[in-house]
Amino acid sequence: MSEKKLGYIPNYARFIMGGSAGMGATVFVQPLDLVKNRMQMSGVGGAAKAHKSSLHAIAFILRQEGFFGVYNGLSAGLLRQATYTTTRLGVYTSLMEKFKSPDGSPPSFLLKCALGMTAGAIGSFIGTPSEISLIRMTSDGRLPLEQRRNYTSVFNALYRIIKEEGVLTLWRGCGPTVTRAVVVNAAQLATYSQAKQALLSTSYFKDDLLCHFGASMISGLATTIASMPVDIAKTRVQNMKIIDGKPEYRGAMEVFLNVIRQEGVFALWKGFTPCYFRIGPHTVLTFIFLEQLQHQARKHFGVLTAL
């Protein structure tokens, strides 16, 4: 397919489309994000219950907190997409456009990885305050009533964190957050494009929803395997409390050592199932929404695609 531009989609529109696509996907996958975070914090500190599996965690949440309990932290999840995903997809699509070959062919796989890593690092730094709010809000229900933070919304969480712990706490765990984002985006954005290209090279797939789903699930598997150890360190550092003036962990490396020593090496992949089944569908939905938004943007800005 050759593309002839009769107009140009401005960068601000790329950022808006990226964030909107991510927010739309989050509405559907927020329960899986909550289950993943609960399992990663399972058995830590004053946790009321150690979850043995994803189904066990879901049943416990529904029984203790009701149906809408699986949507705790949704406001933080949406703000995270409005900051992190807006930035990472906006930066990535802009860079992909910038680094296209003169003949219009996409960048190489290694360059896609580099662009994804760059976009992820920038987006994660901007999105860390909403990330820490999301971690705390989704983890709160695992604690006894007297130990819960009881944030009423993401804005209440941000206000209280600044008031009670200082503004720099909003970027606690920024190091592992950025590291995870670099790993996730290098894997997710690059392997999605590569997996889609590989599927289309066969006689079984065409560029439709089934192909997008298959590429997303392949990408999600690679992303989940690579990112889970960093993700669990990020989750525990951002959710930790200061006890007698001392933090529970001095950094991500202490989390790794504690988890391996106390829970076993495979605990670094605790919450793997909900994480995988969140990343895959979230990628599918994000790219479906993004493609529809881009289609409308091309019509609005006069960018025509000729077959």
Image (spheres, rainbow, N blue to C red):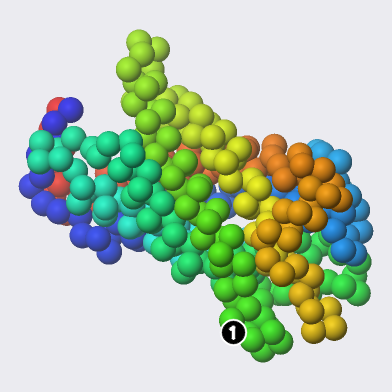
Q: Which residue corresponds to the image point at 10% horizontal and 44% vertical from the top-left? A: 5
Pick whichever, 44 or 132, lies toward us.
44
Quarter holding the C terminus is: top left
- Crowd band around label 1 with a 10 angstrom C-alpha radius: few (<14), some (14–19), many (20+): some
Query: Residue drawn 87% across and 73% down?
Result: 147
Above or below, comparing residue 244 to residue 127 in the picture: below
Name the residue: 59% across, 84% down. 167
Front position in the image: 294 or 105: 105
Depth order, front residue of 47/250:
250
Mark 1 secondary-structure assignment: helix
Observer able to see residue 17: no
* Percent position of residue 75, x then y: 60, 65
Number of numbered tags placed on the structure image:
1
| 119 displayed left or right of 234 | left
Q: Which residue is mark 1?
A: 167
Query: In the image, what residue type sits under mark 1?
Result: Val
Left or right, 270 with respect to 74, comes to right
Image coords of residue 90 (percent x, y): 34, 57
Quick check: can you spot residue 55?
yes
